[in-house]
Amino acid sequence: MPHRFKPEEFKRLFPLFRRAENQGLVYLDSAATSQRPECVIQAVTDFYSASNANTHRSSHRLARAATAMVERTRIASAEFLGASEASEIVFSRGTTEALNFLASSLCSSLDPGDEILLSRAEHHANLVPWQMAAERYQLKLKFLPESLIPGPNGIPQTENFLEYLSDKTRIVSLTAGSNALGFSVDVASVAAQLQSMPCCLVVDGAQLAAHQSIDVKLLGCDFFVCSAHKFYGPTGVGLLYGRRELLETLPPWQGGGEMISNVGLNASEWANIPQRFEAGTASLSSIAGLEAALNFLSECDREAMYDHEQELTQYLHSELMKIQEIELLSRPEGNLGIATFVPRGEVSATDLGHGLDEQDVAVRVGHHCAQPLIDALGKGPTLRASVLAYNTRADIDALIVGLKLALGAVASAVSNADNELAALSIEDLRAHNDWQSRYRQLLKWGSAIQSKPMIRTELNRVNGCEADTWLQRERRGEHYVFRLDSDSRVVRGLGALLLVLIQNKTEEELEHLDIEGVFSSLGLKQHLSPSRSNGFYAMVKKALSF
């Protein structure tokens, strides 16, 4: 039976992939943001060129057209999420703003000591707002334990969910799918177990909405949030669903125009829902783009798209498992199109990510705004490849080839970098008695530091050097390894001196190093210009800022 979804044809609907400079692009970063089809881009342009005006308050035809567009989009959004009525949909700037609103409004009515239940797998957007609210209202945060599945998984344990509640639990806020590892969370099971409990369920659906059709009534949640840019829509707009009876009890989060019905000097009256939660002028062009994205998805075979994405996810994991130089952290089962891995040995995830970028393979490197989960795995920064319906097997094959090439190139560069310092010795530098001879030796040390394009990022930039300088720190077990690059030969020489002192040391050893004493004993403090001395100490600060 032929596959009913044709990703190559689907991909042609996206202008970015049609551009000449992107013919070789392998885009595997859709968990961060999806690409947009032509219809969405055109809708944003059409709004500005044909009906740009503010909504609701003006009586002219452009305002009426803009208002009609917003309310059409609200109705389409309610259908997209399976809400009972359009008034249960609140527009936000995205998932993050929606969660901040819920944390502020829901927690304002709680008593000190009341509890909020989260998981370690949450995106920072579903963690930090609750932390802020807990501090403001003297609430307590509690966290679900992880699943007992062997190996690094991080999946919240939802079986026997009621065991983790207390008589003070008032809010449960969980992701429906991890943006860091791709696993799904059975929020419907959680909702079923919460039916008789005096607490509400908030679901972060940012990753889920891109892959699966949503029905908030079937999920059984009280609130659901997501961002349009994850499911082919524009940035700057997101959706918050809330059950009407709960939305009507919430106070506004922000004050201003559009969210009031009457304003006096000392008090105001709020508008009905959902307008009371939409203060100020919305990103109307983004809402126009959202309408186009929702219409676009309504005409797609979502089930066939999901089947294709699942097939790709299985293939991606199976191919990555064949590469011995990496450790795969994610699992293909129940996965929302994400594969997460780390290189083994001396190669860093950052360097490997840059190596892939040089081959026009776009993946994401870091903690993916889920630092507690990544830290719990004990692996440091990870690489994440994520797929959507426009990806193909050829994209996966290109990633695998790119990984093998990058692993070889980066490993060679790491080896060379480690060998740079092998012949350098502080005692050799001391043996040069006069300053001029010692300075010439420092310049030779600078020549030993090889160029490292992969570390030339803003994250590694050393602020305070007179020349552009970069210093990368990486933890290997209990020890720290450093790499340096600079446009200045003198700075490279001073950097080499620093690396000889700090390379492969533990944090405790680094804390007890008398770097300034060595610097002074070599006459550098006396003979170097203030700007170069400042540059040296800027490198020290960058290296030892734990």
Image: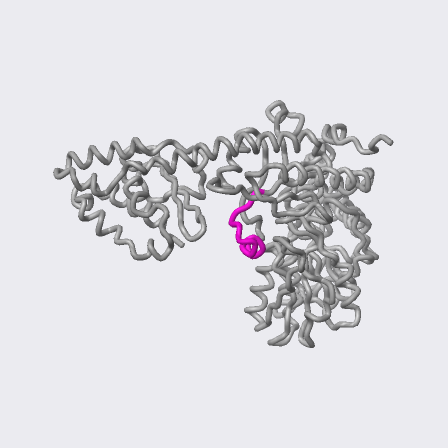
**Is residue 359 at all visible to an observer of this figure?**
yes
The residue closer to the viewer here, 370 or 286, is: 370
Magenta span contains residue 372: yes
Q: Quadrant of residue 39?
A: top right
Q: Is residue 133 left or right of residue 460?
A: right
Q: Is residue 253 left or right of residue 307?
A: left
Q: Is residue 401 above or below residue 192?
A: above
Most distant residue in the top direction: 20
Q: Is residue 336 above or below residue 10?
A: below
Q: Is residue 318 above or below residue 87?
A: above
Magenta span contains residue 24: no
- x, y percent for residue 523: 17, 44
**Is residue 97 at all visible to an observer of this figure?**
no
The residue closer to the viewer here, 493 or 211, is: 493
Which residue corresponds to the image point at 70% horizontal and 66% vertical from the top-left?
A: 250
- x, y percent for residue 473: 41, 46
Q: Where the C terminus falls, by quadrant?
A: bottom left
Q: Where the N terminus falls, by quadrant?
A: top right
Q: Which residues are magenta?
A: 371-383
The residue closer to the viewer here, 210 or 242, is: 210
Most distant residue in the right direction: 1
- x, y percent for residue 149: 67, 56
Most distant residue in the left direction: 434
Which residue corresponds to the image point at 43% horizontal and 36% vertical from the top-left?
A: 414
- x, y percent for residue 56: 73, 51
Q: Is residue 254 above or below residue 20?
A: below
The residue closer to the viewer here, 66 or 290, is: 290
